[in-house]
């Protein structure tokens, strides 16, 4: 109470936005930058799982969050023609670009390392795509509505944060491609509220990048070293 006027209802939303803004900057700006410039080499997947685990914990503690959104596969069949149409056009264009401008990279994972490629095709959607979906779509859309109340603002913010994550790979191709992909995946989630649908689309595009030969721009480690450990 100040001068007979209650300021608490006004102060609480303002303080909440400040707290959310600080959390947003820490998770989606500070952590990627800290990882990018860390003098110590840290495996990225365990760190992703920890942050996605925090996001999932927050979502499950929120009584207003519809837990069905963490999967909700019922929307996938209706969206499948759109997803596959966009993917086929994009995949052909990406293959043509690699063939024309970086022919040495074409099929550079699947041909010399077929076993490792097969492991990536199975493990990547589970260990990387879905945790990213939890963090950059389900959590992001639910948690930061006060910061980005308009639908397009939320989609753009999610895409920008998703792209910025990829500064950890230290190349601008990863950031540029994931900016475009992030827009598509965020828009898909905004339309469906389904992690199953948006993650399926994310996995399609990501698996194709590894297959066509651009995986080295998104892989933190030595393919040869990992592949050699998988040889029978």
Image (spheres, rainbow, N blue to C red):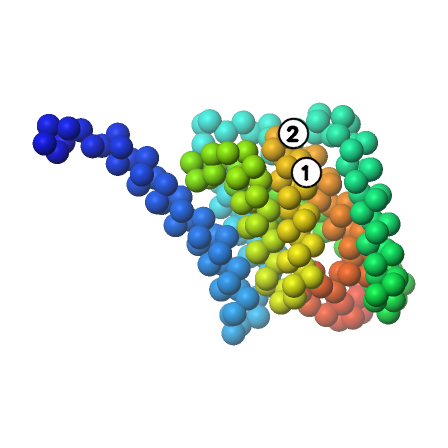
Residue 64 at what x, y percent from top left?
A: 46, 27
Residue 184 at what x, y percent from top left?
A: 68, 42
Residue 165 at what x, y percent from top left?
A: 58, 56
Left or right, 99 with reference to 229: right
Q: Secondary structure at mark 2?
A: helix
Q: In the rendered image, which residue does mark 1 sit on?
A: 198
Residue 12 at what x, y percent from top left?
A: 29, 35
Asked if one can make out residue 115 in the rendered structure from this viewpoint, the answer is: no
Identify the disc placed on residue 192: 2
Asked if one can make out residue 192 in the rendered structure from this viewpoint, the answer is: yes
Left or right, 91 with reference to 15: right
Mark 1 closeness class: few <14, some 14–19, many ≥20 residues within 10 Å: many
Q: Are marks 1 and 2 in contact (CB under 8 Å)?
A: yes
Q: Secondary structure at mark 1?
A: helix
Q: Quadrant of residue 97?
A: bottom right
**For the residues marked 1 and 2, what is the alpha-carbon distance in whole angstroms?**
8 Å
| Residue for point 12% across, 33% down | 2
């Amino acid at each position: 109470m100040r001068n007979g006027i209650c300021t608490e209802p006004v102060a609480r939303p303002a303080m909440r936005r400040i707290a959310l803004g600080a959390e947003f900057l820490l998770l989606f700006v500070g952590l990627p930058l800290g990882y990018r410039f860390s003098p110590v080499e840290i495996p990225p997947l365990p760190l992703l799982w920890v942050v996605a685990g925090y996001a999932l914990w927050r979502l499950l503690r929120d009584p207003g969050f519809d837990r069905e959104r963490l999967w909700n596969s019922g929307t996938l069949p209706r969206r499948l023609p759109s997803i596959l149409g966009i993917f086929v056009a994009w995949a052909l264009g990406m293959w043509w670009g690699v063939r024309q401008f970086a022919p040495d990279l074409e099929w550079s994972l699947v041909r010399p390392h077929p076993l490792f490629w097969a492991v990536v095709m199975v493990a990547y959607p589970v260990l990387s795509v879905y945790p990213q979906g939890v963090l950059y779509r389900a959590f992001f859309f639910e948690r930061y509505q006060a910061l980005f109340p308009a639908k397009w603002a939320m989609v753009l913010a999610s895409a920008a944060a998703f792209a910025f994550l990829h500064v950890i790979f230290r190349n601008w191709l990863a950031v540029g491609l994931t900016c475009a992909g992030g827009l598509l995946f965020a828009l898909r989630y905004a339309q469906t509220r389904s992690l199953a649908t948006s993650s399926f689309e994310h996995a399609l595009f990501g698996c194709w990048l590894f297959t066509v030969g651009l995986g080295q721009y998104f892989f933190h480690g030595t393919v040869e070293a990992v592949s050699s450990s998988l040889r029978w």
